[in-house]
Amino acid sequence: MKPGKHSLILSEYGSETKTLDFYAEPEKVTVIAAETEKNIYEGILVKSDFRAEVFVDGKSIGFTPLVIRDYTLPLVMRFKAENFADRVITVSEPETYVSVKMKPLIKTDITRYSKSRKMFYLSFARTLLIFGGRVAVNTVDFKSQTLKKNLNTGFNIALGVSAAEMLVRLIIYCKQAENIAP
């Protein structure tokens, strides 16, 4: 190290960065002793909408609701509950309260979700076919106007019923999809 004025920056995870200024004299050993101070905060109340086990640094510290005392930043918490997706929350600023909303893993089984998707697409295809038939009836020149009118009426009724069923299938499909965690 060259003689002269120097700065030493101390940084440690979970601690405040500290800068030490010192002077190094020529041909002398300069000994520097320093410590960083941990930023320890008093306590944080942790809650979740469902009872969940809380892990900090890979260790279980209890179940919600609980108070974590003497914590350092950043505080990384993992929430684990049966039938719910794990949640990881990072607290970067001093807080006194954290609330976590748990998301259900699967309220319905995946086969019901797949079936509801398939049923929606089948009803959508049927509605398109009926609509195509209705368009075709109006483009063909029939000798009997009564036949054309009756076919139109039949296609209109079938189209209405099929579109209503398609809407119901879409709602069921969306409800199944929102219950599956990412």
Image (spheres, grey):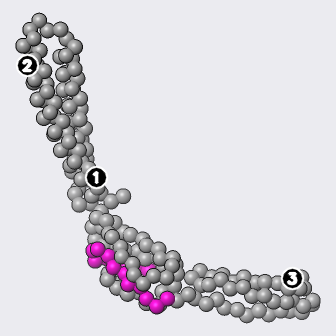
- In the rendered structure, which amino acid carries the disc numbered 2? Asn
Q: Tell me which label, 3 or 2, sits earlier in the chain.
A: 3
Q: CA distance from mark 2 to mark 1?
A: 40 Å
Q: 115 or 130, which lies in front? A: 130
- Residue at image x 78%, y 88%? 21
Tell me if residue 42 comes above or below residue 116 in the rendering. Answer: below
Q: Which label is found at residue 177?
A: 1
Taking the view exactly as shown, the residue that stands out farthest to the top is 143
**SS assignment at label 3:** loop
Residue at the spot of label 2: 150
- In the rendered structure, which amino acid carries the disc numbered 1? Ala
Identify the main secondary structure in magenta.
Answer: strand
The N terminus lies in quadrant? bottom right
Tell me if residue 155 comes above or below residue 16 in the rendering. Answer: above
Residue 46 is a magenta residue: yes
The C terminus lies in quadrant? bottom left
What's drawn in magenta, residue-wise? 41-56
